[in-house]
Amino acid sequence: MVVGGVALITIGIAATMVGPIIAIQLYTPAVAAWWTVFTAVVVQGVPFLLLGTVVSAAIGAFVPERVFTKVLPRNPALAVPVAGVAGVVLPGCECASVPVADSLMRRGVAPAAALAFLLSAPAINPVVLVATSIAFPGQPAMVLGRLVASLATAVVMGWLWVRFGREEWLRPPKRLTGSGVPKTGWGRLLEFRAGLQHDFLHSGGFLVLGAAAAATFNIAVPRSVLDLFTGSGWLSVLLLAVLAVVLCVCSEADAFVAASLSGFSPMARLAFMVVGPMVDLKLIALQAGTFGRAFAVRFSAATWVVAVVSSVLVGWWLL
């Protein structure tokens, strides 16, 4: 995956540099529009992606995981909203949220709280919210809508797990019985470098793919087809909610992709940004590998429904 990320980032950088030349040589309105959208998404998204992965790697390397267990209430129902709010101050991409949640469970954190954190951290952290404000200038309601809808989805899913979750759906992670060997300063630096390299290359590759997919979507899909969806508020929301699952754009860059989908309603673009960090193909695969297929199928399907409903309600209220 890292090798693929390097290749995709290289292609993305090369494309943004030589794209205008190619567009001029092979000029058609469609080619020019494709390069414009692709370059805009990549150039705007990479700085926030880099910032997010730096902070995420620093937290993983230098912040002891026992901090999470100390601040969470023992009652799972009370721990869920605390874990959800914790995502606001702890940046990280969705790729890192699954192993973090697994680690929290292995240290005794209630699964409902760990799952709420899994959903909230990549969706409402400061880097994501700042990126959203840059992608939607002069639209603070979009930033607030993303925060409220994403946090509501994370908390509701945590409470649903408290009420309906079953142990047989969740492959139980092995509890840690010892504190392990303490890491030296040099060891933490090496862990920071490894985490930064993995997260940036992995997420950067998906950013390039997402930018290419968004540009292709804007150009290749006939306007008559889009009119069928953009003319209906419900259909446009459902289309972008499904598109978010397929595109797998990193949460620190998906706002720029959503902003490029200008033909859709604000509510539909909000759904794209709420669903994407919580349910996409790579996350489903990561969850299946970590917690088991039975969990991934049920949890992803329920999260998608709750995220869409939250987006619609918050979008109707704020947008």
Image (cartoon, helix red, strand yellow):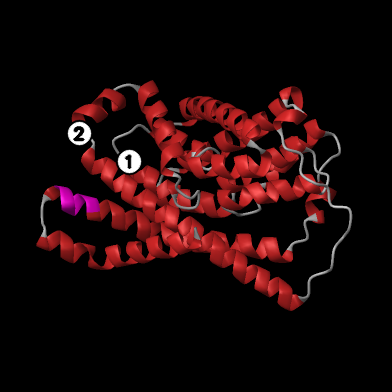
Q: Nearer the viewer, mark 2 or mark 1?
A: 2
Name the mark on residue 308: none
Which stretch appears magenta?
30-34
Number of numbered discs visible in the structure rendering: 2
Residue at image point 65% right, 65% down: 58
* 228 up-or-down from 142: above or below: above
Q: In which image quadrant can residue 294 be found?
A: top right
Residue behind mark 2: 222
Residue behind mark 1: 261
| Residue 165, magenta (yes or no) | no
Q: Secondary structure at mark 1?
A: loop
Q: Amino acid at mark 2?
A: Pro
> Neighbour class for label 2 at 10 Å: few (<14), some, many (≥20)?
few
Report, in whole angstroms, how far the alpha carbon at label 2 lies from the one at label 1: 14 Å
Q: In which image quadrant can residue 260 be found?
A: top left
Where residue 257 sits: x, y (%)?
Answer: 38, 47
Q: Amino acid at mark 1?
A: Leu
Q: Secondary structure at mark 2?
A: loop
* 314 up-or-down from 47: above or below: above
Residue at image point 74% right, 29% down: 168
Res. 277 visible in picture: yes
Where residue 80 sits: x, y (%)?
Answer: 74, 36
Where residue 113 sits: x, y (%)?
Answer: 74, 39
Res. 137 visible in picture: no
Residue at image point 53% right, 37% down: 279
132 relative to 101 in the view: left or right: left
